[in-house]
Amino acid sequence: MAAGPWVDSVGRSTELTFPGSAPVKLTAGTHSLTDGVAAFVGLCVETGFDRAKVERAAAASDWAFAYRAEMMPFKPPVDVGGWNAADATLRMANGIFFNKKPQCSFMFAPQGGADMAAVQAALTKLIGPPGNAAKQFDKNGKAKKYYTPEWTVTVADAKPLKVYALPAVYNAGAFQLAVLQN
């Protein structure tokens, strides 16, 4: 069983497994791809890794989030839980044991489905083009199979942030958007 979604220190999707954890299973609801990308920016990018701000933003959103604690059996126990809805899940941590970098991760299943190119296009509209866009295709113009778009953004006077877009692990048709503080 897995609890998540998280990312490691270089933006790879990370799901934690421990006794009593429940897998995150999402079902597409009424939120579009555009809704999901806008929610990610508002919930994660613009909240500055401030848990109180993330909690308020989640409560004020129209995603019907409910917080679920997930206690890893350490001494003392570590809560790796987050806010869950039928079509999305949100995690935020500042210095969690497996990744000391502040991070916020939002996974959602858009209504009507989408592909990674559409996710990249939607994020590009809001935060600009990915910094590694030149690496998306090989020298013959064929899309690289394992390309993951990455953005570097700066919000207000904060340190640069690294944004990642990934297909969701264990949730076909869903996407994980994550931001890490560099």
Image (tube, grey):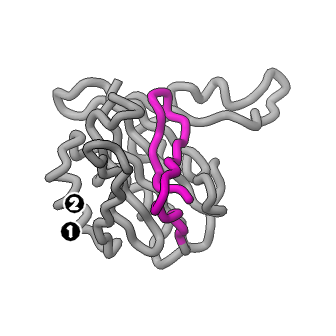
* Label 1 secondary element: helix
Q: Position of residue 83 (x, y in %)?
A: 33, 63
- Check if residue 16 falls in the magenta segment: yes
- Residue 127 within the segment the image draws in magenta: no
Residue 33 placed where, x, y %?
51, 62
Q: Residues within 10 Å of mark 1 (few under 14, many from 20)?
A: few
Q: Position of residue 54 (x, y in %)?
A: 22, 53
Count neighbours of disc 2 (C-alpha within 10 A) and say few if under 14, some if 14 to 19, many if 20 or more. Answer: some
Q: Is residue 120 above or below residue 134?
A: below
Q: Residue sitting at 35 percent across and 34 percent down?
A: 97
> In terms of secondary structure, what is the magenta stretch mainly?
loop
**What residue does disc 1 label?**
60
Apparent side of residue 112 relative to residue 31 in the rendered image (left or right): right
- Quarter of the rendering containing residue 149: top right
Q: Is residue 146 left or right of residue 89?
A: right
Front residue of 50/67: it is 67
Question: Which residue carries the number 2 mark?
Answer: 57
Q: Which quadrant is the C terminus positioned in? A: top left
Decide if residue 39 is in sight here. no
Cα separation, mark 1 vs mark 2, equals 5 Å
**What range of the chain is rendered magenta?**
1-26
Secondary structure beneath disc 2? Answer: helix
Quarter of the figure that contains the N terminus: bottom right
